Amino acid sequence: MIVLQGKGISDGIARGPVCFLRRLPDCTAKILPDDVEAEKARLTAAKTRAVRWYEALAEECRRNMDCEAAALMETHAMMVEDEDYAAYILDVLADERCNAEYAVRAAGERFAAVLSASGDACIRARAADIRDVSRRIIRGLTGGGEAGIGADAPVILAADDLLPSELIRFGKDKILGVLCREGTGSGHMAVLARTMGIPAVCGLGDSLSVEYDESFACIDGGTGQVVIGPDQAALYVFQRKTQESRDRKERLLVLRDEEDVTPDGQRITLRCNINSPDDTAAVLANGGRGIGLYRSEFLFLAAHDRPSEEEQFVAYKAAVGAMNGRRTVIRTLDIGGDKRVDRFDPQTERMSVRDHLRRPETLQTQLRALYRASAYGNAAIMFPLITSVQEVMACKRLCQNVMADLDREGVPFNRATEIGIMIETPAAVLIADELAKEADFFSVGTNDLTRYILAHDRRTGKALESHRSDVLRAVKLAADAAHKAGIRVSICGDMAADSELLGTFLAMGIDELSVPPASVLPLRARVRSTVVKNCTLEKLEY
C-alpha cells in the first residue's frame, strides 16, 4: 500500500483502477520550410479547425444542459483568435522562418510561462487554458489523434495536468476521479470537476508515478489523500468516509422544508442561482426558497440565433411556473467577457445596460417575454451592471412602454412585477442611496464587484480575495442604503455561499442569499446554528 498526499480540489470519494491519460506526442520540432507564407496558410486553417472543434464541443455541452462547460469552450474558441497570442505566433514565424507547429508551441509556452509567474492564483490558473488552445491548434496542424483512455470501464484518470476540454470530452460516465501532478484548485479543470461532481486531487508531483497505471486506488478529493493498492484497513476507512458523506447528505435533507432562521430569530432567505428552467428541479430538491438569479444569457448562448420573444417566454414561464409561487428573479441579458455570444459585437469587455439601452430592440423583446411570463407566477426583473440613476430610470421607462404595448394587445401580465438592480460596480456602491429610491430591490453581484474594486480583468477567472475588508465594506454600504430606503438586499455572487462570511452577512442584516442549489442545505444548517448577537463586523476592520 502506498499513500500519496496532494491537494484536494473537488470533494468526494472515488475508488477504482488508475488509468494514465494517453496523449499522442505533438510533432513540434523546429523545421525551416521553404515557404513561410504557406505555413501561415496552414496556421489559418488549423485555427479555423480549432474554433470549430471548440464550438462543436460547446454545442454538445449545451445539449447535455451543461451551460457552464459550454461557456468555457466558447471562451477557448475566443482564445484561439486572441490578438496578442496570434500576433506572437506570426512574429515567431517571421523572425525564425520556421514551421507553424513550432511557432504555436513557442507562443503557448511563452504565454503559459507569463501566466504561471503571476502573483495572482486565478491568473496562474489560466496557463492550463492557453496550453489547451495551443495543443488544439497543433493537433489541427499535424492531424494527430485525440488523447484517450485505455479502458472500457470508468477509471480514476491520471495525468500531468488534465485540460478542461479533456475533462468535458470524457465526462462523468468515464471518469470516477482525477489525479494530477500539477494544477491548482482555482483552474477551470478544478471548477468543472466540482460542477460535475468528480472527486479530484492535484499537486501530486513526481509521486504520481506511471508505475501505478492499472493499480486499484482510493482517493479523497476533500483531503487530497490518495492510496494506491489499499489494504483492508484503508478500504474500510474509505468505505466509512463514503457512508459518512451519504449520512451527512441525508441529515441535511431533513432541513429541506425547515425555515431559514437563526436561534435568536433573525431570518435570511436562501434562494438559488440557475442557468436554465431545467435547473429548477435541483432548486426544489434542495429546498431553495425560490430563484434569486436566473442567468438569462445562457438561453442566448444555447441558441443558434437570437431567441425569439416566444422562445424566451416559454423558458421564463417554465422557470416561474416551476417555483409554485416562490419568487423568481430573472436577470436581463448580461453578455461579454467570459460569456461569448456570436450574434452580438463584444467591442467592450462586457456589455452594460447602457449598451442595451442604446440599441433597445433586444432588451425590449426580452422584457415583453418576461412580463408575459409574470402572469404565471411570482416573477421579478433585474438589470445588471448599473452605474447611474439615469440608467435605472431609462430601464423603468422601457418597462412602462412594454407594459403599455401589452395592455393594448390584451396580453396578460403582472403590473406589480418588481424591478431590481445589481450592485456590482464601485459607481453603484457610491450612489447606492440614490439608486435605492428607484429600485424595488438590490442584488449585490460580489464576483464582479470584487473584480472591479481590485482591478481584476474579468477574463482571468474568479478573484480569490473576497474576504478583504474593502470588498465587504462596499457590500455593507449597499446594504445600509437599501435598508434605509426600505428595500431588500440580497447577495448572488460566490461570497453568498461562503459559510465563513455568513455571520458577517447576518450582522449586516442581509435579507437574502442566492447560491447554487447544492449549497442551500449546508448553508441552512449553518444559519440555524448561528446566533446573530455573537456575530460581529470585525472582518470589515483594517
Image (tube, grey):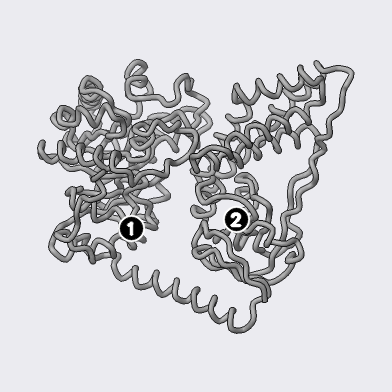
Q: Give residue 517's position: percent from left, percent from top.
A: 37, 55
Q: Quadrant of the C terminus?
A: top left
Residue 481 image offset from top left, x and y in percent:
15, 36
Query: What's the distance in space between the residues labelled 2 and 1, CA to CA?
Result: 30 Å
Q: Residue furthest bottom?
A: 232
Q: 231 or 540, which is in the foreground?
A: 540
Q: Is residue 121 left or right of residue 503?
A: right
- Provide the residue designation for mark 1: 520
User: Residue visible at 19% across and 48% down?
Assistant: 511
Q: Which mark is residue 50?
A: none
Query: Residue 409, can we see it?
Result: no
Location of mark 2 (residue) = 203
User: Quick check: 222 above or below 408?
Assistant: below
Q: Tell me the element at label 2.
A: loop
| Residue 174: x %, y % from top left | 65, 59
Crowd rating for badge 2 (residues with CA inside 10 Å; few <14, some 14–19, many 20+): many
Q: Among all residues in the image, which is located at the extreme front?
A: 542
- Which residue is depicted at the point 72% across and 58% down? 20
| Residue lying at 49% horizontally and 35% vertically, measured from the top left | 460
